[in-house]
């Protein structure tokens, strides 16, 4: 998606430690028109797949998931990072490794909101090691739901996540794929 | 908003401990068409107020904030609950008491994304004690931004939050105002 690459090139900040800050439009401040256009891209990619639910993970995935769901006319479910357990409901739960925070936590979804009737599109902001998508895939598998594919805004294509998820047989659509990035020389996209 | 009251009456679950679970459409699963309609209500209420930014708090506020921002053609900024500090940016920070979780945490917004030029609409899912809105008001005050008002989906009108925020001179629009609720006898709305 040319518009997304352009915005990343203009506003993305590459920091030491392989960090790409895109919080001016993606995951702290949210550029709603831009992410609505992103949602339409995901819709165009998956419109024939019978998607009836979008599954994401709090907090950064929620905005893009909602703006995508508008096109599919379907609900969003977001997996919660469970620190304390204040839910009274039965949940599907799976561990998730955070690449940026260097720790593992559990994510969970109430059993009320995933079912074998669901045809799920997974949405997230970043794909790097693939840990978040793998965890969401596991929650979907536990529920007996079918995942039709994944949509991510930014794929760090030099990390193993894309290969990992595609290697499991899932379709992954990334709106911007980064070949390499460096605090000095900047960002290079896959073309 | 009649549609919202109807949904709360149909799907809201009143649990012991003064808990209203509306996670089938508001804060776990998100009914995107319903919350788009809610966003349009907020737009109709504040369309003449020059809103150029929507401020909310992760995670439950993000979906409704994004679906509201579409009507205002403005960005969303969500305050982060700061457990670890992995941000390199200067932030506005303020303490926030969680009513449901019975603890205090800090919330923060990067100084990059709030400024004295901002005319802010605060959006959140619930108004009970008013702690989240009060914390967002404080972040806005620190930035020198002007808050034109608040929009919440559900106000527990028997708690003190509404009076507290309105008493500070701010307009508050609630789509459903609950007069009383009880696990046995159900939910009564203000009319």
Image (tube, coloured by chain):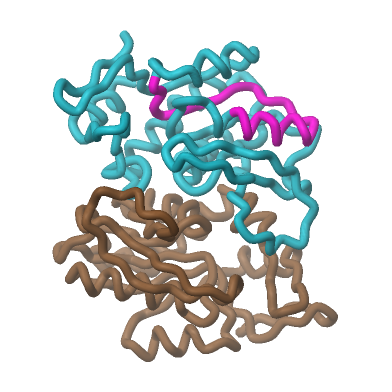
Chain colours: A cyan, B brown
Q: Is residue A100 left or right of residue B92?
A: right
User: Does residue A12 show up?
Assistant: no
The answer to whether residue A120 is above or below residue A65 is above
The answer to whether residue B94 is above or below residue B32 is below
Percent x, y for residue B75? Answer: 30, 50
Number of numbered discs visible in the structure rendering: 0
Percent x, y for residue A21? Answer: 29, 38
Q: Nearer the viewer, residue B129 or A118?
A: B129
Residue found 62% across the figure and 53% down from its top = A82
Residue projecting furthest to the right: B184
The answer to whether residue B166 is above or below residue B100 is below
Q: Is residue B159 left or right of residue B46?
A: right
User: Does residue B60 show up?
Assistant: yes
Quadrant that contains the C terminus of chain A: top left
Q: Is residue B164 left or right of residue B30?
A: left
Residue found 40% across the figure and 31% down from its top = A38
Residue found 64% across the figure and 55% down from its top = B25
Percent x, y for residue A168? Answer: 64, 15
Would residue A177 be counted in the magenta stretch? no
Percent x, y for residue A55? Answer: 61, 38
Point out the stretch of residues depicted in magenta: A134-156
Q: Is residue A159 left or right of residue B115?
A: right
Q: Nearer the viewer, residue A137 or B70?
A: A137
Would residue A150 be counted in the magenta stretch? yes
Q: Nearer the viewer, residue A76 or B114?
A: B114
Residue found 30% across the figure and 38% down from its top = A22
Quadrant that contains the N terminus of chain A: top left
């Amino acid at each position: 998606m040319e518009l997304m690459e352009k915005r990343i090139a203009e506003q993305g900040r590459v920091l030491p430690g392989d960090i790409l800050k895109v919080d001016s439009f993606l995951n702290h401040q949210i550029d709603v028109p831009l992410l609505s256009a992103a949602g339409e891209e995901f819709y165009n990619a998956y419109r024939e797949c019978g998607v009836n639910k979008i599954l994401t993970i709090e907090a950064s995935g929620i905005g893009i998931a909602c703006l995508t769901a508008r096109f599919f006319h379907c609900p969003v479910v977001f997996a919660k990072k469970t620190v304390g357990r204040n839910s009274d409901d039965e949940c599907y739960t799976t561990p998730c490794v955070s690449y940026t925070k260097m720790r593992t936590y559990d994510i969970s979804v109430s059993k009320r909101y995933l079912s074998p009737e669901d045809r799920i599109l997974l949405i997230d902001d970043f794909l790097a090691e693939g840990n978040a998508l793998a965890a969401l895939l596991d929650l979907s598998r536990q529920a007996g739901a079918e995942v039709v594919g994944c949509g991510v805004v930014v794929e760090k294509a030099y990390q193993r996540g894309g290969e990992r998820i595609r290697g499991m047989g899932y379709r992954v659509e990334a709106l911007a794929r980064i070949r390499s990035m460096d605090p000095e020389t900047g960002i290079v996209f896959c073309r």
